[in-house]
RNA sequence: GCCCUUUUAGCUCAACGGCAGAGCAGCGGUAUCGUAAACCGUAGAUGUCAGUUCAAUUCUGACAAAGGGCUCCA
């Protein structure tokens, strides 16, 4: 958590920015300027004027000059009328004032130097002394009050610290983080490409990228087998009619691609796997004895994401969801959730992802059109999930309005290299769909009942997971995930034959091995392999050939000395098997 | 989709409105080498389409793609 003093400093810096903006752009209209996790921003309506990055340094200069006369922030209480009068030309402030007054809250202004702004307070006590180490970072667009129906304001982001060292460190951290950006590493390590000819948001996995994907899926498959899941396989399209029945047509239409005709029937690309799995369930009568049925598939889905939303592998238009649908009786809910939570925890441990949090995603009753209407069922489902979270000792935040249209969910959120949050695992409780599609089972009393459905995404999206893992490991994947595990570097062509023999031995034992016979110096070969983050290098020269051994070097630069091939294989195997 | 920014060779970067230049990678050779860059040679580019101009990589506009945000979301 950010301490209040720093937040106050940053908010004060937002005031300073706003005052300087008015100096340089007198007709600009201020909206709001809060402090945020890594700094602050101010949203401003510049009207017809355009502001560019060059203006940021001008603004910084003005801020540096202005702050010298800012000795304090003084509170000024105003009546609604006085306040509205002061901001009569500013629709944003007026809107805020009217709202505050409607809620019966006090209306306070704060003065610093000659600048006065509507503000609830929380400032630096001596701005002229403390407010020195700041930087304006970027210009962005942001809709007033976050709604795309409102006008777009210009948002200026900045950051601020109490001393130069903290500021420099922060800026350095941002630079460092850019180096582990999965798009940059994806190119450098040859893991995936996005071709303009194929289309945006449609990543192509290269052999190395595809290998990591396979490793992830193989791991999950093993985990699922241990937990009683069964794999299915389903096509990428389905009749539009199906989605009209599920309600996706009404609630999900804007991310589905336009339908196309086959034999006079209307079809769409599937935006999720649920209906396909349900139809497997309903293909024959089900007994309560069969439940829970856990169907699973890494299914590729197609979603229309707006251009501006696409981001490397983190947000794509064709995504593979490691999707499962568990159909069960009501009294199996707790056990199934517990099992899935354990699987998620285990998987996160295998990926060494420790920095994640849990979000209980509920509906937002004020946005009723977004959800299937039935308040009682929603309430019941939400309470059930909250209890499950508590029973499993998970710390959580509540995400109002984050639910799926068919039910609340437990989401697992991780961060990327730029500290942005991304949802990975998701466990969704669905008390609606079985009834709606008339999915049934015969219970012990001989009566037909509707199963409860748990939608489970283990990583959520394989593409996103790949991106998160690339950034998390900075490309240096643990041995079990590394696309190339060992590279053999013969000192010269003379040793290529012996190297070939060693390579065969490793390949035979399932170690992913490459051999670099290029006519290059050893130093260069080591450099290249290290830059490609290959976990182990085997160096072969006269010594090794003579003693029937190999020399091993790790990607960290450690010389592990000379050993027998069989010893090395044993070491690798142990490491691979005990990764989690 | 919207706001801001960017686009020069496979990659990283140069070039006042006046002949587009380098390093690495590639290709052809030479050296047969002991733990992060051997040496010589060679080929390769201004995102697309308009406009202004005697002259455009450079200025203007449209389009495309990419990046940072907003909205949305796995």
Image (spheres, rainbow, N blue to C red):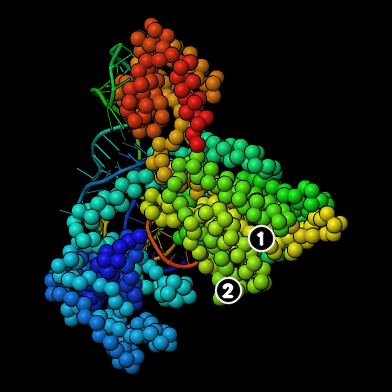
Which residue reaches farthest top? Answer: A546
Which is more toward the observer, A259 or A470?
A470
Chain of the residue under the numbered disc 1 shown in the image: A
Give coordinates of residue A160: x percent, y percent: 25, 62
Q: Is residue A302 visible?
A: no
- Residue A392 falls left or right of residue A166: right
- Residue A448 falls left or right of residue A394: right
User: Which residue appears at 49% of the width and 59% of the height?
Assistant: A396
- Residue A231 falls left or right of residue A129: right
User: Which residue appears at 18% of the width and 76% of the height?
Assistant: A72
Disc 2/disc 1 C-alpha distance (Å): 17 Å
Q: Quadrant of the N terminus of chain A?
A: bottom left
Which is more toward the observer, B9 or A526?
A526
Q: Earlier in the sequence, mark 2 or mark 1?
A: 2
Give coordinates of residue A130: x percent, y percent: 18, 66
Q: Tell me the element at label 2.
A: helix
Name the mark on residue A356. none
- Residue B13 falls left or right of residue A187: left
Which residue reaches farthest bottom? Answer: A81
Chain of the residue under the numbered disc 2 shown in the image: A
User: Which residue appears at 31% of the width and 47% of the height?
Assistant: A176
């Amino acid at each position: 958590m950010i301490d209040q003093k720093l937040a106050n400093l940053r908010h004060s810096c937002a005031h300073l920015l706003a005052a300087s903006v008015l100096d340089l752009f007198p007709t600009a209209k201020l909206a709001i300027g809060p402090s945020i996790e890594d700094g602050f921003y101010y949203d401003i309506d510049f009207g017809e004027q355009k502001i560019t990055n060059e203006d940021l340094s001008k603004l910084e200069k003005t801020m540096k000059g202005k702050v010298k006369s800012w000795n304090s922030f003084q509170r000024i209480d105003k009546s609604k009328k006085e306040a509205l009068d002061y901001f009569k030309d500013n629709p944003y402030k007026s809107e805020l004032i009217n709202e505050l007054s409607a809620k019966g809250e006090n209306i306070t202004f704060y003065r610093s130097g000659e600048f006065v702004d509507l503000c609830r307070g929380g400032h630096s006590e001596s701005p002229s002394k403390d407010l020195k180490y700041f930087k304006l970072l970027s210009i962005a667009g942001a809709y007033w009050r976050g709604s795309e129906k409102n006008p777009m304001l210009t948002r200026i982001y900045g950051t601020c610290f109490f001393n130069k060292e903290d500021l420099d460190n922060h800026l350095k951290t941002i630079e460092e983080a850019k180096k582990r950006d999965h798009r940059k590493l994806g190119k450098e390590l040859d893991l995936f490409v996005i071709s303009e000819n194929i289309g945006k948001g449609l990543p192509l996995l290269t052999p190395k990228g595809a290998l990591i994907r396979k490793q992830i899926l193989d791991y999950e498959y093993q985990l699922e087998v241990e937990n009683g899941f069964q794999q299915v396989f389903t096509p990428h399209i389905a009749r539009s009619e199906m989605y009209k029945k599920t309600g996706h047509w009404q609630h999900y239409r804007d991310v589905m691609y336009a339908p196309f005709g086959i034999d006079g029937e209307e079809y769409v690309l599937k935006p999720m796997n649920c209906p396909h799995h349900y139809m497997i369930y309903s293909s024959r009568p089900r007994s309560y004895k069969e439940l829970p049925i856990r169907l699973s598939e890494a299914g590729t889905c197609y979603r229309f994401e707006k251009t501006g939303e696409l981001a490397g592998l983190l947000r794509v238009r064709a995504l593979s969801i490691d999707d499962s649908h568990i159909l069960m009786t009501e009294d199996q809910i707790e056990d199934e959730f517990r099992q899935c939570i354990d699987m998620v925890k285990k998987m996160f441990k295998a990926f060494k992802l420790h920095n994640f949090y849990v979000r209980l995603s509920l509906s937002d009753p004020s946005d009723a059109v977004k959800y299937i209407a039935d308040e009682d069922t929603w309430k019941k489902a939400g309470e059930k999930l909250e209890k499950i979270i508590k029973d499993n000792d998970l710390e959580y935040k509540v995400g109002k309005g984050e639910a799926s249209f068919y039910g609340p969910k437990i989401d697992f959120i991780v961060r990327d290299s730029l500290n942005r949050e991304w949802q990975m695992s998701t466990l969704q409780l669905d008390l609606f769909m079985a009834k709606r599609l008339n999915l049934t089972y015969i219970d012990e009393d001989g009566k037909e009942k509707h199963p409860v459905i748990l939608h489970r995404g283990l990583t959520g999206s394989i593409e996103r997971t790949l991106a998160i893992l690339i950034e998390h490991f900075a490309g240096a994947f643990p041995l079990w995930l590394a696309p190339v595990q060992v590279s053999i570097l013969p000192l010269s062509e003379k040793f290529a034959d012996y190297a070939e023999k060693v390579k065969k031995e490793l390949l035979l034992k399932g170690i992913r091995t490459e051999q670099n016979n290029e006519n290059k110096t050893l130093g260069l070969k080591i450099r290249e392999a290290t830059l490609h983050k290959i976990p182990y290098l085997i160096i072969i020269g006269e010594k090794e050939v003579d003693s029937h051994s190999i020399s091993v070097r790790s990607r960290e630069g450690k010389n592990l000395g000379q050993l027998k091939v069989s010893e090395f294989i044993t070491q690798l195997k142990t490491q691979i098997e005990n990764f989690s």
